[in-house]
Amino acid sequence: MSQTAIMAGAAPETGTGTAVEPRGPRPKPFFTPRKIIIYSVLILFSFYFLFPLYVMIATSFKTMPEIRFGNIFALPQQINFDAWVRAWTSVCTGLTCEGLSPGFWNSVKITIPSTIVSIFIAAVNGYALVNWRFKGSEIFFAILIFGSFIPYQVFLYPLVMITRELRIFGTLQAVILVHTIFGMPILTLLFRNYFASLPQELFKAARVDGAGFWRIFFEIMLPMSLPIFVVALILQVTGIWNDFLFGVVFAGTQNYPMTVQLNNIVNSAQGSPEYNVNMAATVLTGLVPLIIYFVSGKLFVRGVAAGAVKG
């Protein structure tokens, strides 16, 4: 066969004159039964989880007459922000009618120090348990992990007694202390497994060069640990921000976080329920965890895949 025919795409011929079929894998069709099933299940679950969010947002922009005489699943006829303004500034959250804004700042004051302190201590614990083993370290780690599986309710009364003796019961400091304590076991497990997955040659080389405990931690381990720090950050922020039990027990009536105030709004017995205000308050309360998930979702997956659940 001529070179022109080969370049034109004709199948080459053998010595007997028969054409040879071109070799190579056949292109796979995009819509295979397996892909159809996978995407159908994913879309179904997406609707399952996103539909309540749609109902909350749509209802929050409606007026009460539209809610009473309209379809709860329908879009609002006209966008109305009155429910959002009322939920933030003037809705009654118990004995006071100042909206969710005081609870928001209380949640911020609780979440930031609790997250920073618990993550830092857990990172140091995980680093020490992997690279600076001491006598009884495995027993200490086993006890620490065992404590993380005990229900919170078992510790409530002892912690009430401890915070009372420390003279911080009914204050934000008590809630910060409790969240810091309960966040450390699971975070220590995450950091220990992550640091165990890092190359030990780096640690040994730094030790040979004369680097000490803190220098190795800050100059070698921390720069390599961004994914697991994001995982710990998401777990702590969402866990602390969404907490209700510790806030209602330890904070005191003047320091209720946002979740406790939301409960007081929804379960208020004064007047008829204002569903648009309740929905707006619910969305406002969950806005911080939603933003964190959307912003750092990829890093969260990287952290989990890089060792958060290994070991």
Image (spheres, rainbow, N blue to C red):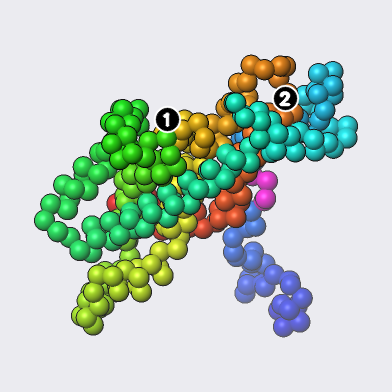
Residue that protrudes farthest toward the right in the picture? 77
32 magenta-colored: yes
In magenta, the rendered stretch is 29-33
Q: Is residue 179 placed above or below 200 in the rendered structure?
A: above
Q: Secondary structure at mark 1?
A: helix
Q: Is residue 156 placed above or below 126 in the rendered structure?
A: above
Closer to us: 257 or 228: 257
Disc 1 or 2, which lies upstream in sequence? 1
Closer to us: 287 or 15: 287
Q: Kindly identify the residue that appears in the image at 51 percent across and 58 percent down.
A: 299
Q: Which mark is residue 275?
A: 2
Q: Kindly identify the residue that appears in the image at 33 percent across and 39 percent down.
A: 167
On screen, residue 253 versus residue 187, left or right, reads right
Residue 126 image position (x, y, % from top left): 29, 56
On screen, residue 273 versus residue 202, left or right, reads right
Which quadrant does the N terminus fall into?
A: bottom right
| Residue that carries the numbered disc 1 in the rendered image | 249
20 magenta-colored: no
Residue 171 image position (x, y, % from top left): 43, 39
Closer to us: 38 or 230: 230
Amino acid type at image mark 2 = Tyr
